[in-house]
Image: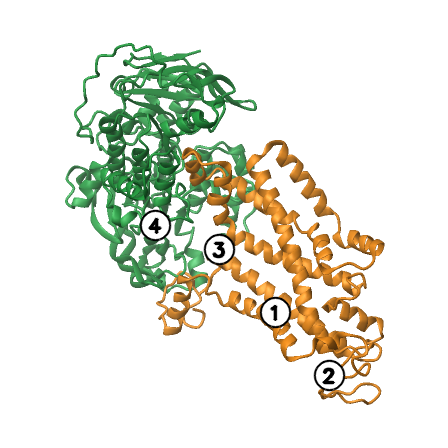
Chain colours: A orange, B green
Amino acid sequence: MADHSTPNAAGAQTPDLTARQIRRMKRFDNPWRNPKLIWGAGLLLGIVAMGILGRIFWDPDLVFTGSGLTRQPPVGLENLRGQVGTWAHPLGTDGAGRDVLALLIIGAPNSLFVGVLASLIGMSIGIFLGFSAGFIRGRVDDVIRVLSDVMITIPPLLILVVFQAAYGDISLTMMAILIACFVWQSPTRLIRAQVLSMRESGYVQMARLSGASTMHIMFREMMPNLVPYLFGSFIANVTTSIVTAVGLEVLGLGPQRIPTLGRTIYEAINSGALIQNLYWWWGIPTILLALMFIGLLLINLGLDEVSNPRLRKL
Amino acid sequence: MNVLDINDLSIDFPTSKGVVHAVSHFSLSVPKGRRVGFIGESGSGKTTTALAAMRMLAAPGFVAGGSIRLNGVGGTDLLGLSDEEMRRVRLRRISYIPQGAMNSLNPVMRVETQIWDGIVAHEGHVEPGELQRRSREVLAGVGLEPHVGQLYPHELSGGMKQRVCIAIGVCLQPDLIIADEPTSALDVITQRHVMQTLREVQDKIGAGLILIGHDMGLMAQSVDDLAVMRLGELVEFGDVRQILENPRHPYTRELISSVPLVGGDSFLDSTPRAPEVQTDTGAPPLLEFRNVSRRYGAVTALHPMSFRLDGAVPQIISIVGQSGSGKSTMGGLMLGFNTPSTGEVLFKGQDINALGGAAALTFRKEVQAVFQDPYACFNPFYRVNHALKFPFKRFGLARDEAHVTTAMEEACVAVGLDPSLVLNRYPHQLSGGQRQRLIVARALMLSPKLLIADEPVSMVDASLRATILKNIHDLKDKHGISILYITHDLATAYHVSDYVMVLYHGHVVEAGPPKEVIGHPQHAYTRLLIDSIPWPDMDRDWGSAADARADLEELDRISQRPETVYRGDVPGFHLAQA
């Protein structure tokens, strides 16, 4: 409305509604048709699609050492040795001759996978503990609350560094499980708070009057109304998990033999890419990570608007 | 001389489904020193009109036409002022006393600082001593001690907070005061005090007053002129006595007749059945309280009490009291949502807190409830028929899917709803009245032995209250369900109940048949409650603010040593207080 109405919100003057404004208002009839949500989902699906299509149209075996000459630049660029990029390795190669494009095709979905898996496990724990604490209350609540409060104060990266340094190479799934141990606290607290207020609401009381079992009340009456919160919390957790995973990998503590975006950045830094000005080597994975985070952020903002109509603007 | 002239005002709200005309072609003038009431149901546009005069309409609402002229600023159209000019008008010329003063005061500022804020914003720098003097003066004007100025809002009671809001509203002696349901969150006794304070202050500064409300009784006691609004249109305007005694528009008549009066004609047209001769069958009573009390920490919500409801003949027992009297605690105890601190609650001779498995399910089937808030009682995720269908199946009443549908449809028809219009909708698509009637229909479907009705009509528009109470009354008459009616409204309790208990601070202070207890109260508290009800009757005056203050002091005195006045018994119900 900014371009039509006068600045006073009291609406002293009539804002004339253009067709565009009416169309924008119509959008709110279906809250899921939110542009932020659509763009965010599009970005993430793009990364997944890159992983799938890449395996079909590009050779995933190029991720192995010595697939090409070392430290080749992408097409159209030149490295310190004056070599020009070739179409055999469109995004260049790394210090061990691995094809960067293949690394990204395999690595980007891997990073996303770790984030989603860790978040799924964390959310499951959070839903279980949050519902238990909020609904059963009493001792159970005390224990869960203290536990999650204590866990929130422990910096996850510190523990993970110690753990990984002690155990060496681990698989992607193992890493996701380890990260999940540190992302269940905030959904637990969020769900507990929601359940505490919801259990006093009229419809829960009505369900109790109807002789509903605890399970029915928790999962049939309360859960559907929590879906927007759960989604929001899930997406926020995916972000946290990816940040944690990439943080570990950049320190060289992730899986040693599986390509991930963080591992690629680690090797770039480790092989002096910064000094030799091979910026594409660490730059391209960083851009992919940035796109992933922007996608997640947009989804989160979109979900916020879906669950809280007051945030929707004309 | 008019303070405010509203001329042909229209306010529209654009939505995706088209433009909603919140107010259309509304014209009205407020003369100096006169009190004008805006009455109407929710959505009638009364608050929207007042907000337009303050130029505080919520987006996307806008004024589509007309003018609002304020004569204090030379009769200019308020709608044409710049934001800065409008800022100067607010509070100085028109002040607004909001609904729910609880949330309108800044919790981290002292009361007097909040009064000074307004003065400084309009007059620039004022000497601290002068500010102090003026805030004390204005607080004294609303009957508050000077030391109240030093307090924070959380240290004040609801009535005091509302009076602070009035003090802020009148500190610059505006030409017009707009009070938007200033007493809607207060109990009747405090309401009387606050309204009288407002009237006195307004008289003193000679401002015009617009009082927005939905209570015909409050209007009769507070205003000179009354504007009846419906769906954004002014349906009737005139002197309040003329409107009350000789309403012209059918809607006004409907509004007036929907206010139940103590001693007036009953809005229930049922013929009271003579109680059947009771044979003592020796069966355990339907519901029994044995020395039940409930404490929350140091606070005792309910003092030990015992009663026995036989239930052989269906009866309506009313529990009347203000907020905090312990009446909802009693409701919770009866439903087993709350456990007694001492004593036990027995249903058909069994302690309801010690039931297990099948017995607990039977108890749930036989004791049902209607709650206060019809908006919260439906899960927004499901269509409304979920709330009816689920318990019906759960209690094993359903033979098959078709039987469920028939039962739902019959119950809807019985409460006067068209099943095809309501059953397949989502809760937000229904009005509050429709939802509350569906909850009554749900109780009817399950045919319990006992229904706990906790303030079933307090959040429903006045015109629908009578209908819903009639529905509930029918449950007793036609379906043989005993009902415990929990309410703060003495007038409805008078009409529907067979026995009334007046609760005060967790004590029963007066109990007996309604004709005695409410018709001819003996306990000081009951009398005070009845005197504080604003009657829609010009000849029955509320008294002055001094009377109200004296009554409040009387209340403090009796709260020290409550005693119970028994006013006779009805067969099938026995009360004893420890």
Q: Position of residue A200 (x, y in %)?
A: 48, 37
User: At x 68% / y 58%, what residue is drawn?
Assistant: A241
Spatial CA span between label 4 and label 2 = 70 Å
Distance Cα–Cα, label 1 vs label 2: 21 Å
- Camera-side residue: B302 or A5? B302
Q: Which residue is mark 4?
A: B47
State which chain disc 1 sits on: A
Point out the image quarter for the N terminus of chain A. Answer: bottom left
- Residue type, label 3: Asn
- Tag 4, which secondary structure? helix
User: What's under tag 4, amino acid-wise?
Assistant: Thr
Mark in front: 1 vs 4: 1
Q: Is residue B104 visible?
A: no
Q: Which mark is residue A48?
A: 1
How far is disc 1 from disc 4 in space, using C-alphas? 53 Å
Mark 1 neighbour class, 10 Å CA radius: few under 14, some 14 to 19, many 20 or more: some
What is the distance, in whole Å, between disc 3 and disc 2 at their CAs? 47 Å
Label 3 sits on residue: A308
Residue with the mark numbered 2: A89
For marks 4 and 3, give the one nearer the viewer: 3
Check disc 2: other Cα within 10 Å, few if <14, some if 14-19, many if 20+.
many
Chain label for disc 4: B
Q: Secondary structure at mark 2?
A: loop
Q: Secondary structure at mark 1?
A: helix
